[in-house]
Image (cartoon, rainbow, N blue to C red):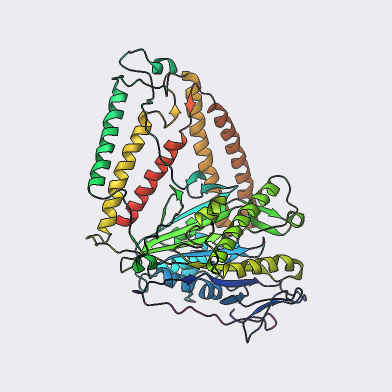
């Protein structure tokens, strides 16, 4: 499997020589690699991309372009070879405490998802079962990609000693961020402040004539109101103000985790970086290969995909999977895997309707990434420090720390080897050439005092304090009526009908999820039965149609203002912040 066709050429893998664990790297290049999708078996077409075995340079004979920036080039379909060349050095760096990012970039159909996850249907529990029963002593099922192989490497406790591993998965679709592990719940990016007022849900209980009595739920109570809701709101607000004053007197304005960077060591005070994240993404514990297979299977089944003329499984969104764990020495391990949607030309893919709009959104976000890379390259080449347009797209905001930030970043440029795609191949390789000049400043987390359970007590105490404050703020918003839900005093019949609809919809969604899992496992069986697969596909289509019909009915009923009100944006975000802190605290205490 390691042998490669001589005409394709192959550059030996060059593994980085990393500094000792105690050393902090001041400047880090983005490690650029190229993976060339092999030609179809039996094809007599000459390859579009060639590699000079002596210099290691890539060349495109049809255009005359030569690229010498890749640190490694992988040709062929062997996933173990790809992991050793593209990902193993990054995992070693992550285990030394550095935040690491692996990005797959390229045109549609060039093999990004295959590289990052594997071929369709391979991430199932049946594959793990066959792998455990086999006696070939491989490190992972042969078809698994870089992400599952990395997690299996961290699970090797005898060699790595890594503590419980947690993972999150989100996708960026049409500039919106969705949680793939929590029913595609929409998440917010960045941070915002919630303004507190005297707006309280419900009318005054004291009977005073005020605006709330006329306005109903969500009315504004006057400052002289003495009802129970206003009293609770005032007490909680006083408690928050008291805690804030005590924190300021103690010299702590906001709970934060100190970072050690090259700038702080050298005495530079301008070391504050703006970072963004999707708030409230659900974390999943990966405690076994089977849990890993279930997680990856859910990502594959939930992520937005469509087929077009160039790709049967075209990703219509950018997928970001983050791994968080702790090493034996207590250092945090953070790995971010980014499977970018492929750039595409609508004239070649034949996309129309929704698929065309998706292609335009994908190309727009990739163009925003290109502008960020260009600005970083100009700043790193000695030019004047200019504005880096991270806020142009949700994708670039989420990758703020990966490009020009504190992460150790590796990028895999995936290209096709057919001459028909030579224009797109050259564009991808040129983009990689621009990425190669970007510099990051890797950083590691300061290790605090260890508790008896193994957690960092300083960080745990900070998280507990911040979580308590967030919960009090959430309670204030709930008292104000920002939590939404059924309205008191609405039509009883309509409310009961909506409750029944929500219950039926939940059952229908559960049935769809079960059938999706059954379909994936049936396709991934050793000898898949075509009859069983077709039967499950029919059942899944019927269940999906039923669920969508119920969803449409429920959504229409929820527009009736007399019975239902959606949570406000501020409440939703605060709830996501509380959930994120609870999950982070759980990981620290594990």
Q: Nearer the viewer, residue 25 or 288?
A: 25
Give the magenta part as a residue range.
7-20
Query: Residue at horizontal 32%, vertical 17%?
Result: 205
- Left/right placement of residue 327 relative to residue 216 reads left
Report the front residue among 392 and 456.
Answer: 392
Magenta segment, prevailing SS (helix, strand or loop): loop
Residue 268 shown left or right of residue 241 in the figure: right
- Residue 105 visible within the image: yes
Question: Measured from the top left, where is residue 165 in percent x and y?
Answer: 39, 60
The image quarter containing residue 220 is top left
Can you give x and y, in whole percent of width and height, for residue 501 in the image?
52, 30
- Looking at the image, residue 415 lies above or below residue 459: below
**Looking at the figure, which quarter contains the C terminus?**
bottom left
Membership of 161 in magenta stretch: no
| 20 relative to 232, above or below | below
Q: Residue 364, percent across and down?
A: 64, 52
Q: Given the current orientation, which residue lies at the most extreme front position?
A: 384
Q: Nearer the viewer, residue 381 or 432?
A: 381
Is residue 119 visible to us here? Answer: no
Of residues 314 and 233, the one nearer the viewer is 233
């Amino acid at each position: 499997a390691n042998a490669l066709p001589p005409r394709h050429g192959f550059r030996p893998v060059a593994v980085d020589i990393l500094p000792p664990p105690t050393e902090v790297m001041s400047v880090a290049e983005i490690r650029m690699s190229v993976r060339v999708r092999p030609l179809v078996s039996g094809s007599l077409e000459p390859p579009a991309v060639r590699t000079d075995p002596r210099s290691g340079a890539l060349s495109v004979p049809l255009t005359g372009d030569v690229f010498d920036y890749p640190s490694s080039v992988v040709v062929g379909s062997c996933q173990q070879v790809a992991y050793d060349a593209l990902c193993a050095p990054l995992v070693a760096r992550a285990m030394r405490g550095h935040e690491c990012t692996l990005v797959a970039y390229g045109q549609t159909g060039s093999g990004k998802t295959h590289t990052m996850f594997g071929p369709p249907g391979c991430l199932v529990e049946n594959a793990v079962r066959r792998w455990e029963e086999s006696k070939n002593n491989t490190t992972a099922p042969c078809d698994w990609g870089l992400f599952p192989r990395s997690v299996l490497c961290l699970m090797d406790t005898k060699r790595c000693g890594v503590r419980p591993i947690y993972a999150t998965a989100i996708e960026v679709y049409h500039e919106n961020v969705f949680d793939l592990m929590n029913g595609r719940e929409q998440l917010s990016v960045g941070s915002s402040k919630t303004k507190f007022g005297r707006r309280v849900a419900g009318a005054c209980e004291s009977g005073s004539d005020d605006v709330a009595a006329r306005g109903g739920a969500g009315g504004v109570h006057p400052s002289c109101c003495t009802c129970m809701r206003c009293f609770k709101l005032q007490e909680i607000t006083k408690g928050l103000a008291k805690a804030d004053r005590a924190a300021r007197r103690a010299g702590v304005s906001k709970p934060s985790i100190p970072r050690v960077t090259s700038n702080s060591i050298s005495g530079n005070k301008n070391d504050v970086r703006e970072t963004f994240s999707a708030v409230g993404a659900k974390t999943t514990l990966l405690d076994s290969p089977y849990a890993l297979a279930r997680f990856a299977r859910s990502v594959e089944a939930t992520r937005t995909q469509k087929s077009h003329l160039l790709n049967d499984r075209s990703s219509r969104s950018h997928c970001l999977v983050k791994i968080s764990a702790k090493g034996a020495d207590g250092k945090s391990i953070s790995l971010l895997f980014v499977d970018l949607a492929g750039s595409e030309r609508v004239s070649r893919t034949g996309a129309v309707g929704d698929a065309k709009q998706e292609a335009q959104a994908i190309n727009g976000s990739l163009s925003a990434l290109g502008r960020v890379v260009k600005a970083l390259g100009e700043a790193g080449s000695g030019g004047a420090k200019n504005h880096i347009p991270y806020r142009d797209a949700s994708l670039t905001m989420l990758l703020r720390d990966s490009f020009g930030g504190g992460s150790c970043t590796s990028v895999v440029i995936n290209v096709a080897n057919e001459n028909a795609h030579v224009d797109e191949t050259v564009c991808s390789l040129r983009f990689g050439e621009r990425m190669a000049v970007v510099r990051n400043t890797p950083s590691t987390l300061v290790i605090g005092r260890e508790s008896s359970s193994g957690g960092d007590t300083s960080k745990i105490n900070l998280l507990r304090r911040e979580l308590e404050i967030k919960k009090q703020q959430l309670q204030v918003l709930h008292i104000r009526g920002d939590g939404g839900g059924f309205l008191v005093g609405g039509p009883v019949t309509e409310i009961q009908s909506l409750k029944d609809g929500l219950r039926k919809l939940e059952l229908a969604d559960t049935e769809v999820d079960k059938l999706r899992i059954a379909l994936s496992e049936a396709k991934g069986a050793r000898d898949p039965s075509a009859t069983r697969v077709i039967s499950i596909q029919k059942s899944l289509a019927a269940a999906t149609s039923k669920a969508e019909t119920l969803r449409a009915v429920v959504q229409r009923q929820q527009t009736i203002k007399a019975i239902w009100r959606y949570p406000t944006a501020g409440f939703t975000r605060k709830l996501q912040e509380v959930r994120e802190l609870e999950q982070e605290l759980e990981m620290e205490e594990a």
